[in-house]
Image (cartoon, rainbow, N blue to C red):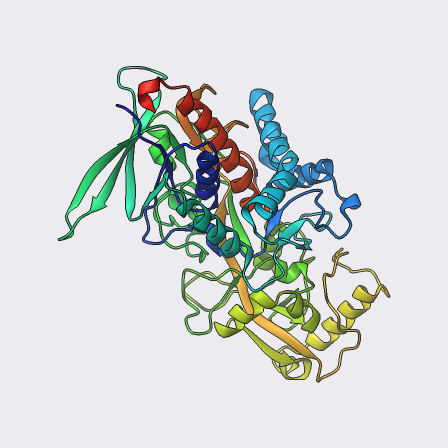
Amino acid sequence: MTPSAIIVIGSGLAGLTTTSQLLTHRIPVLLLERFPKPGGNSIKASSGINGAPTRFQPLPSLDSIATFQTDTINSAGGPYISATGAEKARRERLIATLTERSAEGIYWLTDEVGVELSRVARLGGHSVARTHRGSGKKTPGYDIVSTLLGRVSADELFRMETERRVTRILKEEGQEGGRVVGVEYAVVKEGNQTVVEQAYGPVVVASGGFAGDARGLLAQYRPDLAGIPSTNEEREGTQPLLQEIGAAVVDMEQVQVHPTGFVEGGDGEAMVKILAAEALRGEGGILVLGDGRRFVNELETREKVTGEVMERAEKLPTKARQWDVKLVLDEGAAAALESHLGFYMWKGLIRKTTVGELGEEMAALEGTLREYVDVVSGKKKDEFGRESFGNWTITEVKPESVVYVGKVTPVVHFTMGGVVINELSQVLDAQGRPIPGLWAAGEITGGLHGQNRLGGSSLLECVVFGRIAGDEAAAFYKGLAPSAQ
């Protein structure tokens, strides 16, 4: 079985980064995408990508790789703390690789790929501002993914086939520890006839997580999340494809529920929500209960903010499990997120109003805003512990003061669990051995984020480990017999 290309499964940022890296080595790539359009969930990412320290940070001297590592470890929590021996060491190497190569990843995107990432914000769980996005109208996920897609599509060694659902990963027969040699995938032909085809070569899996697999892997590992909306369209998780050939999985029960998904006015019962970017809070936005009272440090980790919402907010009388929470921004915070606000307002997810008008709906709001203004100005400390206020600019609260408000609720967003990899993006079996000819990158993998992922580290993970997977797979491909090239 002579490989004609390296096979990449999934066209999100991890898959496109891997592809781009392979093409720099002049290795042919066949990219298989199960949906009609490429981009995956990466194209929807709206807060940015982490990097530390970089020249774009307003005060880069305040950040360091060590600080980024500490924030990541603190966020990872229990699974990292309880790990021992080889598993502890593996998690440490993954976190070290992510953080040590973060600035390099930012510079690759800006200096080589051509993506503008000059604006930096502080998100929840971070001790400093390190989440990069552009200053233009494009959201970071769309900008990065669309630019990379254009870059790889122009290369003659690249071929992408959409609506190709991989059904099996092929290994050498009769050999324990044999190498991966290709994939089988389903193709729907004219007349709705489904046929199975094969492609041969080393494989990089970048097919994403299972946060949209409500009836499958989510129901298996986290049945307690049933009924909570998701930011992910319904799609089955692909970890079982790798388990079938001996890959180990880890942290499958670790699922991130993001505190802010928009409750769409037209269909409040929709089970797929648009994410209210964490940058909205990073730039100064606050969360209030139905009566207008603030109740949490909005820049705590996603896990902690979600827990406070579920404990403090009233449940909405809907079939979907939703809570009554509002996100409020002033004009300064809104201006800092112009690219986001235009889209959100066009979709009817955020509306522009005044303190007076909004106060008719939420009796405690005006008092909440007056107290928040005193905190931002330094007149008093925040009772919830918030210390960073982004671009909040209101200094005096008046009935005519302009504010922006959106109705939000917790949403299933990201799965931290997945197949076990090492720092070289090699997929490992239950004995910790690499499966030859197989790599993985992005949300399909597990063990890096523990019980809670920091905002901005999902795109970073795709870039860092996608580049590593590309380099490692290229070396493997070049090492095959000459007849295989």
Question: Residue 186 vs residue 347: left or right?
Answer: left
> In this view of the protein, can residue 295 be seen by the observer?
yes
**Could you tell me which residue is drawn at 34 percent across and 24 percent down?**
485
With respect to residue 395, does 91 lie above or below?
above
**Could you tell me which residue is drawn at 75 percent across and 82 percent down?**
398
With respect to residue 268, does 62 lie above or below?
above
> In this view of the protein, can residue 324 be seen by the observer?
no
The one of 337 and 161 positioned closer to us in this rendering = 161
Corner quadrant of residue 334? bottom right
With respect to residue 410, does 70 lie above or below?
above
The one of 143 and 460 positioned closer to us in this rendering = 143
How far across and how far down the image is residue 340, in percent?
56, 65
Question: Residue 286 vs residue 264: left or right?
Answer: right
How far across and how far down the image is residue 441, in percent?
47, 36
How far across and how far down the image is residue 465, in percent?
52, 35
What is the quadrant of the N terminus in the image?
top left
